[in-house]
Image (cartoon, rainbow, N blue to C red):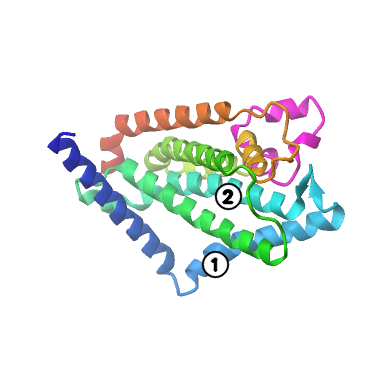
Amino acid sequence: MSEAFRSSFSVTLAVWRALFLHEALIRISGGRARWFWLLADPLAHMAFLAFVLTAFRSQLVAGMDTYLWIVVGLVSFFLFRRAAMQGMHAIDSNKAMFAYRQVKPVDTVFVRAALETFVMLLTGLFALVILRLLDRDIMPGDPLLLIVALFGIWLLALGIGLIFAVPIRLVQESAVILNFLFLPLYLVSGVILPVARIPFPYQEWLLYNPLVHGLEAARLGFAPGYLAIAGLDLNYLYAWGVGTVFIGLALQLRFSERLIAQ
């Protein structure tokens, strides 16, 4: 490893660490209970949805415990949505940091996506602890599949954040339209409706959504007996993830000077 590469890599790590601490400080500077609400909001969402679904369904969804089905699905989806949406606004929110020449726009997107992932994984851990206290089995049957699925979801979120961060920075009015596009994903990604129970041909249409593959694989990682949708393909999820990251990095490189000067 050359000295120049090592120096460049160490500078990048230092920038990421500083940005991570800066973002974390901003999140908790609004009050002492700020971190509490960051965790409590999605936990309350899970609790409400669990109450509603168990009131009208049995204790199992496609062979998986209903509570665990809800927790895994919501944590996976919120991981994507929060990492992608916060990443989209990262450049615009950190424009003051570009006074330091070591900080690049792409660094802010990456770090904010990583921070949101950390928060959601922490939230998921709290939810699983609560389920364990309720005497539910929370041990994943296939931890490797779970990790691969969650990383694929995060990779897709990072790519979406990198791509959409450019138009939001250059044309701020586009943020309203882009934020609105995330609303239908909640309904068509299998978060609250078992995709395997949706009749054909609509079920096949949902397979074009890469998030469906990620959520179904994450649930399958927790419960090997889960009746996942036919046609589940993590290669499809990763193709989208790698493709969007590549396009996002290309856009960041192409418009880097305008993103800083805007």
x, y percentage for residue 161?
45, 40
Would you say residue 197 sits in the magenta stretch? yes
Q: Which residues are magenta?
A: 184-211
x, y percentage for residue 20?
35, 55
Q: Amino acid at mark 2?
A: Phe
Q: Which residue is mark 2?
A: 78
If the image is split into quadrants, where does the N terminus sit? top left
Q: Residue at x 56, y 31 (%)?
A: 237
Furthest-bottom residue in view? Answer: 32
Up the image or down, 85 lies above or below 38; here it is: above
For the residue carrying disc 2, how many other residues have a C-alpha within 10 Å: few (<14), some (14-19), or many (20+)?
Answer: some
Q: Amino acid at mark 1?
A: Trp
Residue 262 can be seen in this image: no
Would you say residue 95 sits in the magenta stretch? no
Q: Residue at x 63, y 34 (%)?
A: 213
Q: In the figure, residue 204 lies in which quadrant?
A: top right
The kind of secondary structure element at disc 1 is: helix
Left or right: 186, with 108 as reference point: right
Q: Which residue is mark 1?
A: 37
Residue 78 can be seen in this image: yes
Up the image or down, 111 lies above or below 125; here it is: above
Earlier sequence position, callout 1 versus callout 2 = 1
Q: CA distance from mark 1 to mark 2?
A: 15 Å
x, y percentage for residue 183?
63, 44
Q: Residue at x 46, y 29 (%)?
A: 242
Out of 135 and 243, give the one closest to the viewer.
Answer: 135
